[in-house]
Amino acid sequence: MDLKAKPFNLSDEDIEWVNSTLASMSMEDKAGQLFCVLFKKAVPEEFDYVFGIMNPGACMYRVVPVKNAVEASNALQHMSRIPLLIAANLEKGGNGIVEEGTLVGSPMEIAATDDVEMARKMASACAREARAVGANWAFAPIIDIDSNFRNPITNTRTFGSDSERVKNMGKAYVETVQSYGVAAAIKHFPGDGQDERDQHLVTSINSMDADEWMATYGKAYKACIDAGSLTVMAGHIMQPAWSRKLVPGIKDEEIMPATLSSELLNGLLRGKLGFNGLICTDATTMAGYMLAMGRDKAVPYSIAAGCDMFLFARNLEEDYGFMLEGIRNGIISEERLNEAVTRILAVKAALGLNKKQLDVDIDEAMKIVGCAEHKTWAQECADAAITLVKEQKGVLPISPEKYRRVLFYTIEPSAGGEGNYKTTPACAKVRQMLVDEGFEVEDFVPQPYGEGFTTKYMDFVNRYDLIIYVANLSTKSNQTVVRIEWKQPMGADCGHYINDIPTIFISLENPYHLLDFPRVKTYINCYSNNDCCIKALVDKLTGRSSFKGKSPVDPFCGKWDAHL
């Protein structure tokens, strides 16, 4: 391990700090450094609980107010003898760490602009707003490739299905975020988006053959590694072709997800791709991790297999005990333990955390978080990304003079989830903006009766001038599909009137709804449901702005009838 080499690039002084710090640590200290713990609310009670068990090497907040984040960062760095890595899911903007943060655009929204510079702007907003509240580690960029439209978790969290675009935008993110002193974590190695299942719920599979993987995912990882990414996040994802290539004769039951796979971590990531930085597991509370191996064995084996840091815990006291036992009984050798801790310390030195750290200031943070420049970038992104996938000639633009009476269909779940996976209601905002434009908007309400008694077809045709569907179905963990569930009776809100009433379908999030509504003749993808996208959408519907986005995936889902 060469600490002067990429990605650490440490000076002699930095290396001396790493070595002297390592030499001063007990076994328990070293074991604590292996953990990145979760502070869900970032409050003192959580800090006292964790520090009563161990001195962790890193932590992560869920999304909290700026004031909480600033106070937490300052308190935690003062509590820690060794500076902490403070992480956040900075996938879309500063909204990944603080409630007031700017959502510049989902990765797929960024991709739809087809402009690498927009990826750099998003990364800049992520880094600036995170640094302002004391964070120094981005669990991003996602360089998964959304090659399977059925995958319920990758979706708009990716830069699309084109591996070249994913590579270029991922590389731009790494270079930009690290120029601000925030470590990148390219994820989720060996690559999500192939399987139609979610690694939160099952140990999933990247099913490409070895050569195809290297020409796509491998190329994206190599570009980001060569750009100097300090860390990689390993997923609970198997890559059987590479496991079999690196370990001839390996049995099916011996093939493990990357978080527990020595051949993928050491043979592929460090060996073939030349990664010298820190490897962190994805959240070890996921079922994809739990299903692969008993937890008492898996906790230390993650480190023994080649991961350097262990993300989260089911029960912190128990998992810390599993780790200590794994060190004592030799699952984790002394050499492997020291190597892992050295890489953790080296990342901290590469970020300058070994030098005197000043407290972050709430007033300064508020000047940066949600600032006008970042909001302008979000507006630019929305304007450039929204994509007119298919269009019925003559329907657009719309106006109250042309289509006064609008029937409005809402496809949206009730609010739920947490953090980056929270469903944010947005359909009502689109509806209100249409009302403000002067349209007479009536909500569709399913009738309580079915065959033989439904309102006459021609009564509907004569009653409305335009139908607008707005779908707001976003990906989130612990869901198996992102599909439309039509209302009863008999798909009451399906497109029964598309042949006689001009109909527009708008997806605020998931770009693949033509799978469930293939014959709709005008279809629009927005990729995000934030206010910037909604405003830009209405401007485009009414003709005040043109559609500029280029679809970064196949929105037709390979279905010929979706083109009709």
Image (cartoon, helix red, strand yellow):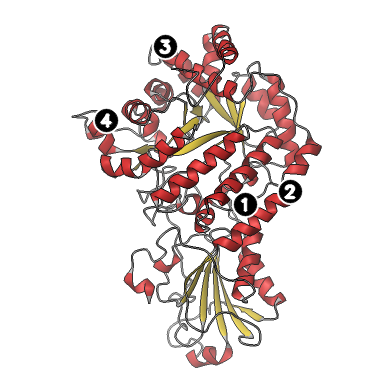
Tag 1 secondary structure? loop
**Who's the residue at 64% across and 42% down the image?**
63
- Of tags 4 and 3, the one toward the viewer is 3
Q: Of the numbered discs in the image, which one, if any, rests on residue 254?
A: 4
- Please give the residue where the numbered disc 2 appears in the rendered image: 371
| Secondary structure type for disc 4 | helix
Q: Secondary structure at mark 3?
A: helix
Q: Amino acid at mark 2?
A: Cys
Sequence order check, earlier mark of 4 and 3: 4
Seen as rendered, the residue at the extreme left is 249
Question: On the image, which quarter does residue 220 sit in?
Answer: top left
Q: Which mark is residue 335?
A: 3
Q: Label 1, label 4: how many angstroms apart (C-alpha)? A: 42 Å
**Amino acid type of the residue that numbered disc 1 sits on in the rendered structure:** Val
Mark drawn on residue 104: 1
Q: Give x and y (percent) for residue 381.
A: 60, 57
State which mark lies toward you, 1 or 4.
1
Q: Is residue 197 left or right of residue 207?
A: right
In this rendering, the answer to whether 356 lies above or below 231 is: above
The numbered mark, 1 or 4, whose residue comes first in the sequence reads 1
